[in-house]
Image (cartoon, helix red, strand yellow):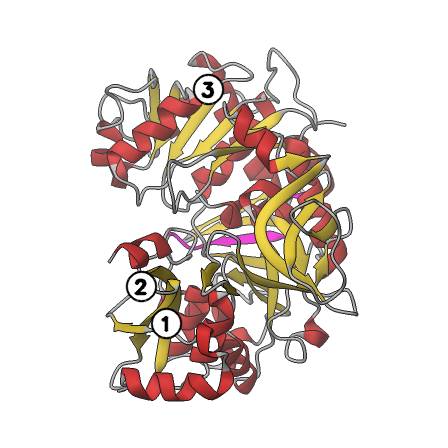
Amino acid sequence: MRGIGSWLTRRELLTPDKEAIVDGARRLSYRGLNRRVNRLARAWLSLGLKSGQRLGILSYNRLEYVETVMAAAKLGVMVVPLNWRLAAQELKFILDDSGAQFLVFDPELAALAESLFQDTPVQKALVIGDREVLQAPAYEVLLSQQSEAEPEPDTPPDQDTPHIIMYTAGTTGSPKGAVLSQGASFWNAVNLDLALDFTSQDRDLLVLPMFHIGGLGLFTLPMLYLGGTVIIQRVFDPAVTLRLLEEERVSLFFGVPAVFLMLSQHPDFSGRAFESARLVMSGGAPLPVSLVRRYHEAGIILQQGFGMSEAAPSIATLPKELALEKAGSIGRAVFHLDVAVVDEAGLEVPRGRVGELVMRGPNLMRGYWNRPEATAEAFKDGWFHSGDLARMDEDGDLYIVDRKKDMFISGGENVYPAEIEQLIFQLPQVAEAAVVGVKDEKWGEVGRAVLVLKPGQTLSARELLDFLRPKLARYKVPKEVVFQEALPRNAAGKVLKIRLRDK
């Protein structure tokens, strides 16, 4: 089967005038998008880019990001999305690790890009826009010099061709690059279509950064496959998001819990902005049940999904009709993915018991780039080990208990911070909360609760502990309570718990 770059070729043939991308004042049809992508692919060929090589991209969300990803697909090139929130030294590690010799960058990030031209494999760069920056040729100038005809790469890509090296968030240690084939993105699109009934009439609002797998797989690439429309928001801003949801008649919206929390705290938040949205889904981090109820009160059904970079990213979704009844569950695995909950020996545990979530399916990564040992550790007996602790109820619905590395042992008993966090979120004064295990001479480890309060709200440590004690076993009740103005998070919206442990 041909690679996913052929999606745009087919879309120009089948639905040439259908709106594909909205980026501010720019609106492109599938005909326009495909022809620009062809020009870009030919421009890269003229600069010497060949199949199998790596191309880094350092940019905010924008049309050119989509074009770069799809041009790479047509050429059989691997895209390396770069997190512009990282320090230059961290980005240099990713460029060195991936061996990316080519770079496309946003002119607004020129200062950061300049620091990447030294002591990295980067040899050639392209700057987005129509002006040369840092001696890098201008994107639009090169496009204008190319033909709109389909490019002719030296090795035609197919479903097995590696396409994206998505570096994990790196909350601990150095990040690893999950290598996703073009087929992984295809099966992610198919799985989401089967689970969520996507159509060509859907309009998706993209707010997650495209250097994160959620920005690409939820739901940008699936929309291009099905012929839908992607509305691009440069960076997340609650006021802009609420406006675009309404003005662009958005039908699909995916975000992380931090996004939904900030939207709910904005003075303009109401169900009106979501009137056209038939799917509002959260993933990327545990979703507080209290937040699900807050949206329900506003007339919005907030569904839970679950995924990870290594799965391109979709793993499970909770149906809309169960969003409130089974709040806290991630639902069931997507169609073309097998999942199981296993013990340390790899044996499936009984329903209701906690074990590690493992999976196998065509949307999973090929492995970690240049990390054969890490790949072998992740894949055992044909199953990918997620590192997430989960349980499955009698109906077959999954519940993520916690990350395996976040669980701690206090006095010989397992403690799952996510369970405690869900209770803390029931307090109306709390905006954000995280629980971590810290060393203790007597018990080995004890809990530390770190809270962010809503503006104008007050809550003492004693009031929090008095609230928790009747609801938790004694060993689960945190021994420390810390109040902060904000929780440290990575680009995926996940709390950096290692920082909270080290404080």
Q: Position of residue 325 (x, y in %)?
A: 67, 80
Quadrant location of the C terminus?
A: bottom left
- Residue on which the image places disc 2: 487
Amino acid marked by disc 2: Leu
Seen at 76% across and 61% down, the residue is: 350
- Residue on which the image places disc 3: 44
Amino acid marked by disc 3: Trp
The residues bearing labels 3 and 2 have C-alpha atoms spaced at a distance of 41 Å
Q: Position of residue 410 (x, y in %)?
A: 44, 64
Return the residue found at the far front.
442
**Image: 269 above or below 121:** below
- Residue on which the image places disc 1: 432
- Residue 250 visible somewhere in the drawing: yes
Q: Position of residue 447 (x, y in %)?
A: 38, 68
User: Along the horizontal axis of the image, is 452 left or right of 355?
Assistant: left
Q: Are marks 2 and 1 in contact (CB under 8 Å)?
A: yes
The answer to which of marks 3 and 1 sits earlier in the sequence is 3
The answer to which of marks 3 and 2 sits earlier in the sequence is 3
**Image: 81 above or below 404:** above
- Residue 7 visible somewhere in the drawing: no
Residue 114 colored in magenta in the image? no
